[in-house]
Amino acid sequence: MNRERRKTVSIADLKEGQQINDLFLVSKKNLAETKSGNPYLALTLMDRTGEIEARAWDNAARLDALTEVGRIVAVEGQVKAFRDQLQLNITGLQGVNEKAVDLAHFMPASRRDPGEMRAELAFLISSVSDPGLRQLLAGIFRGQLLEEFCQAPAAKMMHHACLGGLLEHTLSVAGLALIISEHYPRLDRDLLLAGSLLHDLGKVREFSYASVPFDYTDQGRLIGHLVLGAEMARREAEKVPELTPERLDRLLHLILSHHGRYEFGSPCLPMTSEAILLHHLDDIDAKMELIDRLSEQVEGEGYRWSDYQRSLERFLFLKGRNSAPRQQTEPETEQEAREPEKKNPDKPARQPTLF
């Protein structure tokens, strides 16, 4: 197989029976055994359009040694149907020189234009009338940190989990904040906007996103993006004498409290109008993006029931988009969907978070 070539086939376009010889990124792998004790290699392959399960039944140990999670491989095989899902039967696999391929083909990325989002961020910063907050934002969103912020995902997998996802989510929350601030004029518009732009700043340190699958950094797991973001904002604020300590405290409160509850990682609860609002806007945008993504996976022109969504603790009634109809199946019962997860009937239910 050719080591250096362009990607030509997208996972979203694969058809049953198709022979392929193309490049994919390995997001999961496992060397397992069949019931008869024969080894086989189970892979999950991905590109920016989706994922597909893949199996290598022959020479599994040798092929396993040729790749690892996060690497791009050249794959030969045939697309087959297995339990109503497409699966790739691998006949050949080889590592490739990643410097010779465009990684944008293999990592999920925001559908918004990067240049357009950067321009929107700059406009929002310039619209802040408070000199101290405006200088703080301008000092943070520049240079290498700006580049990292524009590339980072907003989450590992639940919402905006793509390159540029953090910027897309941030702009969405900021846009909602501006609309709400017009409806409630007593809100501190500048403070709310600054908090919206900075609330997830620490995610540039929380996640490692140089390769897929995205994962947490050691610092991210040990400290978390709320505290990391507050620390980053406080350090930059030392260079902005126009920003008073009282004003800075109110801004840091927005960052530290935006998850809304102690059990969701907030070291403090939202205790100002702006903080309460930011928490809910952040949660709304995360959930709406998740629902929108799930809707795109629904086949047919009418409404269909989704699988049980554990993160939301419910089924969703979603409208299909631009795809052929399929036979409707009854959703599993909620009790069956939750297994093998165990619920404590004496513990009150709590609304989940996607942060």
Image: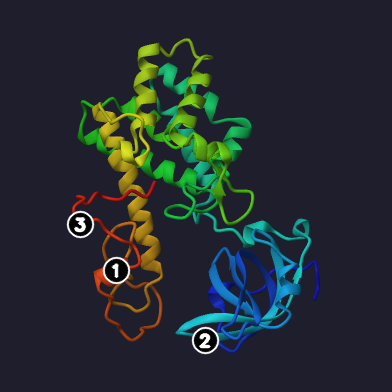
User: Label 3: how many residues lie within 10 Å, few (<14), some (14-19) or many (20+)?
Assistant: few
Name the residue at 67% across, 57% down. Answer: 103
Callout 1 amino acid: Leu
Asked if residue 6 lies left or right of residue 227, the reply is: right
Distance between the Cα atoms at labels 1 and 2?
A: 25 Å
Work out whether 232 lies above or below 5: above
Residue 334 at x, y = what percent?
25, 69
Q: Secondary structure at mark 3?
A: loop
User: Label 2: how many residues lie within 10 Å, few (<14), some (14-19) or many (20+)?
Assistant: few
Callout 3 amino acid: Pro
Callout 2 amino acid: Ala
Q: Secondary structure at mark 2?
A: strand
Residue 291 at x, y = what percent?
34, 60
Distance between the Cα atoms at labels 3 and 2?
A: 40 Å
Check residue 81 in the rendering and tell me which mark sits there, or answer none.
Answer: 2
Name the residue at 37% across, 50% down. Answer: 354
Depth check: give the residue in front, 339 or 139: 339
Name the residue at 39% across, 24% down. Answer: 252
Depth check: give the residue in front, 320 or 270: 270
- Residue 198 appears in the picture as rendered: yes
Work out whether 149 lies above or below 336: above
Which residue is disc 1 drawn over? Answer: 318
- Mark with earlier residue (1, 3): 1
- Mark with earlier residue (3, 2): 2
